[in-house]
Image: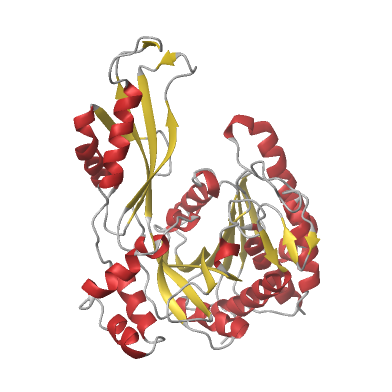
């Protein structure tokens, strides 16, 4: 028997545990992560009793529900993460770590990303086991505590754990795309997009060095001046358009749900690329499907307002299409900025990685996600998609044959904008949808046929 009201209270309590990742405050960070582990033990006693649990660290937990008998299908893995980004000061409607339930929603950091999915997976398995669920294949759950800072201590260590034990999954399901409302042209109602691929990720450091000194008598062009010129040059030189298989499949699938001449043009893509690409490029969200992207995010130079810096740096967050390499991004960036005396290197981080391979938009895993979507939402359009952000799933590509990314919630554009921002919240209706979805998914992908 499902218990959506119980999940409301669990999510509210979960938000009150500030499991943010702050490397400069490790003791406090780990105290909150240990509190999360204790919270899971109290909240899901059946899962903890019936499943094998392995705690790899404060940042990594694995559960295994063994198959009820011998089978020919390989294991499946459901993943989520319990860390959150810090809540910056802002005009929050409710304190970000209070877990307030008001106005038909639960408010706070992590409500959308990604504590709801984590708890909904746990609650779905908890209630299914209580209802006598009998799995035909091994079902694993893996939860990480540092996805927002790269996943090195969480998902990456968990993937090594599986590899060392020669465990390979037929299917992995992680967070990612969702049911969007009013986002895609030609489809006014909700449409579900399943991430069959995701972009790679790199952080590049662009550096300029020049004479420093007192701000009262600077050189004509300081390091900061040269860096500004380099940044402006990068802004003028976008990465070129490249159509990858996942995007071609998405556009053609979209065309099957759009009528008239527009639908016909989409179904003929990429033959119709000269017409379709300008439309996709007009929106930042869909333009990111067409090219590698770069965003300058962190600037640093002098430590005081009356000092001319000898070194000025800019960090670029780069997202890479499948088939693009991290080194090619470094070389391309250097060709643009070298005339300004700048150098380019990978920042000292662990989250530089090429895009994982694409998974097929049919068959084991994909069809199960689609079936669970229909159970939850009814007959709405379902499309494969290139997820332009990054998830923990990229660390598992060496131990999973197929990877799909889907977050079972329905959001409008203004609600999507609250992720990682002020007033993150999730409707109570989405809490219920998430539980319905994961119960249906686990029964479809792992239950007896």
Q: In this view, does 249 lie to the left or right of 15?
A: left
Of 365 and 219, which appears nearest the observer? 219
Of 142 and 419, which appears nearest the observer? 419
Of 126 and 109, which appears nearest the observer? 109
- Residue 29: horizontal and vertical position, in percent? 66, 38
- Residue 273: horizontal and vertical position, in percent? 23, 73
Residue at image coords 50%, 78%: 191
Q: Is residue 153 above or below residue 76?
A: above
How has the structure been colored for display?
secondary structure
- Residue 333: horizontal and vertical position, in percent? 26, 41
Q: Is residue 210 left or right of residue 27?
A: left
Residue at image coords 77%, 80%: 1
Please say whether residue 269 is visible from this viewpoint: yes
Q: Is residue 148 left or right of residue 207?
A: right
Residue at image coords 64%, 61%: 118
Q: Is residue 202 above or below residue 186?
A: above
Of 200 and 310, which appears nearest the observer? 310
Q: Is residue 6 above or below residue 15?
A: below
- Residue 365: horizontal and vertical position, in percent? 47, 75
Q: Is residue 240 left or right of residue 346?
A: left
Question: Residue 244's quadrant in the figure?
Answer: bottom left
């Amino acid at each position: 028997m499902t218990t959506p009201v119980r999940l409301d209270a669990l999510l509210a309590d979960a938000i009150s545990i500030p499991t943010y990742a702050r490397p400069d405050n490790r003791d406090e960070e780990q105290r909150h992560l240990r509190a999360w582990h204790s919270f899971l033990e109290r909240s899901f006693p059946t899962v903890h009793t019936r499943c094998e649990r392995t705690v790899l660290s404060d940042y990594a937990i694995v559960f295994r529900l063994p198959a009820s008998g011998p089978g020919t299908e390989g294991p499946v893995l459901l993943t989520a993460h319990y860390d959150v980004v810090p809540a910056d000061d802002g005009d929050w409607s409710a304190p970000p770590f209070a877990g307030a339930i008001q106005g038909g929603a639960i408010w706070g950091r992590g409500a959308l990303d990604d504590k709801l999915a984590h708890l909904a997976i746990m609650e779905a398995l908890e209630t299914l086991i209580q209802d006598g669920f009998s799995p035909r294949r091994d079902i694993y759950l893996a939860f990480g505590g540092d996805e927002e800072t790269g996943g090195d201590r969480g998902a990456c260590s968990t993937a090594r754990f599986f590899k060392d034990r020669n465990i390979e999954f037929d299917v992995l399901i992680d967070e990612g795309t969702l049911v969007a409302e009013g986002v895609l042209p030609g489809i006014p109602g909700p449409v579900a997009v399943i991430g069959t691929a995701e972009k790679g990720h790199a952080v590049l450091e662009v550096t300029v060095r020049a004479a420093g000194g007192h701000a009262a008598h600077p050189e004509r062009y300081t390091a900061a001046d040269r860096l500004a010129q380099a940044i402006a040059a990068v802004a003028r030189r976008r990465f070129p358009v490249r159509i990858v298989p996942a995007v071609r499949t998405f556009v053609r699938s979209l065309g099957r749900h759009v009528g008239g001449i527009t639908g016909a043009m989409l179904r003929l893509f990429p033959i119709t690329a000269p017409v379709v690409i300008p439309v996709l490029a007009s929106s930042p969200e869909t333009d990111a499907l067409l090219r590698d992207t770069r965003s300058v995010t962190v600037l640093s130079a002098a430590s005081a307002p009356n000092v001319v810096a000898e070194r000025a740096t800019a960090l670029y967050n780069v997202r890479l299409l499948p088939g693009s390499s991290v080194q090619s991004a470094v070389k391309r960036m250097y060709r643009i900025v070298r005339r300004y005396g700048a150098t380019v290197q990978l920042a000292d981080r662990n989250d530089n990685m090429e895009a994982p391979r694409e998974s097929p938009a049919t068959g084991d895993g994909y069809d199960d996600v689609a079936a669970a979507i229909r159970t939850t939402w009814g007959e709405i359009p379902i499309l494969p998609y290139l997820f332009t952000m990054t998830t923990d799933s990229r660390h598992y590509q060496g131990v999973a044959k197929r990877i799909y990314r889907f977050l079972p919630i329905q959001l409008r554009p203004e609600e999507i904008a609250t992720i990682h921002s002020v007033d993150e919240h999730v409707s109570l209706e989405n809490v219920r949808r998430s539980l319905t979805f994961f119960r249906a998914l686990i029964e479809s992908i792992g239950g007896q046929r």
